[in-house]
Image: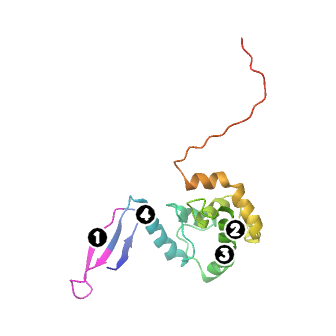
Amino acid sequence: MNFEQETYTKHQKAYTLENPALKGKEKQYMSMPTDFREAKLYFDFLLQYRYTKLREIHFTQPGFFEKFQIALDHTPTYRWTDEDRYEFLQVWPNIEYAFQKSYENALSISAADALVILLERFTFDQIAAMDTWVLARMFQAYWKELYQLSFPNAITAETKKTVGVLQTA
């Protein structure tokens, strides 16, 4: 069965299903539940591909494509030009390699998710100027945020070593 997207809006998301029993191009509409994480990720990928035409990147967190676009100083519906794609794809392998070198399957997020975290602190041009070693160090510097993104329900505890005297009355 072939699924294709017929409409996509924030309030109505529907797929069409080609019915092999029907001849011609008649289609049946089938509602898809959109409250599932996988469905949200799939819709995000469809949007991402529509606007960027990039198959090389994927996000594991719903809503991160919009954050990605905003972090690049674009509107969420900005359509990338060939020049935008070319500039991004020149830098992307370096970013992906640095992320994989730093975490080697230790986190359940993608390099694109980690890039969004870096884009909140640096411009894309600054990230593009970094070599692989510096990028790997940057990913390691933001380990805590990447870990929390990877395991959002994990409980983390911080301890502070204090030196002092307990005074009692």
Specify start and end residues of the magenta stretch as a single range.
16-33
* Residue that label 1 marks: 30
Give the camera-side residue of 7 and 126: 126
* Residue that label 4 marks: 38
Give the label on residue 159, or none. none
| Cα distance between the residues tagged 1 and 2 | 42 Å
Could you say whether the residue bearing mark 4 is in a helix, strand or loop?
helix
72 magenta-colored: no
- Residue found at x 52% / y 60%: 61
First-in-chain label (3 vs 1): 1
- Residue found at x 61% / y 59%: 106
Q: Residues within 10 Å of mark 3 (few under 14, many from 20)?
A: few
First-in-chain label (4 vs 2): 4
Callout 4 amino acid: Glu
First-in-chain label (1 vs 4): 1
Give the label on residue 93, or none. 3
Callout 1 amino acid: Met
Give the camera-side residue of 106 and 96: 106
Q: Is residue 17 left or right of residue 129?
A: left
Q: Position of residue 82 (x, y in %)?
A: 61, 83
Q: Nearer the viewer, mark 4 or mark 2?
A: 2
Give the camera-side residue of 7 and 15: 15
